[in-house]
Amino acid sequence: MKQILLISWLAVISSGIGFIFWYTDWQYSLPTPVPKNYNPSKRGSFIALGNKIAVPAKKPVFIHFFNPSCPCSRFNMEHFKSLVRHYGDKVHFAMIVLNKKETFTEKEIQDKYDLDIPVSFDASVADLCGVYSTPQAVLLDEDHHLYYRGNYNKSRYCTEKKSNYAQMALDTLLSRNAMPVFDASAFSAYGCQLPTCQK
């Protein structure tokens, strides 16, 4: 009898844990709601960064929109760092940290994530680029026209090679090939909604 109770109890606990994992995975697979009066920046439009981010002239710019409190942003960080390592000599990388609850310094972010790239906290860059959730990737060509704005990958951990959207955009921009035709999941925002960056 004790054995049956123990097995039943373990089955209930296992089911509960399985449900929590399923629910979390399901929650982060849902697109982020599009804000009212959302005005997306169109591909090819000029993004006037001004002095919001220190970027060199005549070099493509990759902007990573990030929130340290957003689980999706944290899942994505290793993939983003791999892009910086692989393309850092050809593309200027920068990070926009968006978080209403905590404050950080540029050095704290650089040290925590072992990144030697400019970090800004200017939320107006998200509006300029049409970004309304984190994490999101924005790639500008060398004249700072919007080339790609969207997701890194369909997979939460960016492990699905066939949907490695941000990397594909980088490759086509640098090789001057035609942009691949992406499915809707490349451009539907997933993750934590701005301005609060809560899911």
Image (cartoon, rainbow, N blue to C red):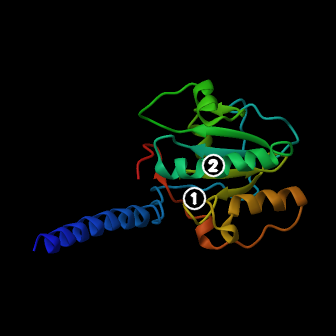
Mark 1 secondary-structure assignment: loop
Badge 2 is on which residue? 78
Q: Nearer the viewer, residue 150 or 83?
A: 83
Which amino acid, by three-letter code, is at mark 1?
Answer: Tyr
Question: Residue 49 at x, y = what percent?
Answer: 71, 37
Q: Quadrant of the N terminus?
A: bottom left
Q: Is residue 92 left or right of residue 183?
A: right
Tally the marks.
2
- Asked whether the residues under the numbered discs 1 and 2 touch, taking CB atoms below 8 Å apart as contact, a structural biologist would say yes
Q: Which residue is mark 1?
A: 157
| Image x and y of residue 79, in percent | 65, 52
User: Where, by quadrant of the figure, is residue 180 drawn?
Assistant: bottom right
| Residue located 79% across and 67% down the image | 179
| Label 1 Cα neighbours within 10 Å, binned few <14 / some 14-19 / many ≥20 | some
Which residue is painted at 29% across and 67% down in the image?
14
Q: Which mark is residue 40?
A: none
Q: Position of residue 156 (x, y in %)?
A: 54, 60
Q: Residue at x 42, y 43 (%)?
A: 196
* In the rendered image, the vertical position of residue 25 relative to residue 114, given as above or below: below
Residue ID at (16%, 72%): 3
What crowding class fits label 2: few (fewer than 14 Cα within 10 Å), some (14-19), or many (20 or more)? some
Q: Which sits in the foreground, 24 or 32?
A: 24
- Mark 2 or mark 1, which is nearer the start of the sequence? 2
Q: Nearer the viewer, residue 4 or 112?
A: 4
SS at circle 2: helix
Residue 193 shows in the view: no
In the image, is 65 to the left or to the right of 168? left
Residue 26 in view of the camera: yes
Under mark 2, the amino acid is Glu
Q: CA distance from mark 1 to mark 2?
A: 8 Å
Residue 135: percent from left, percent from top = 56, 50
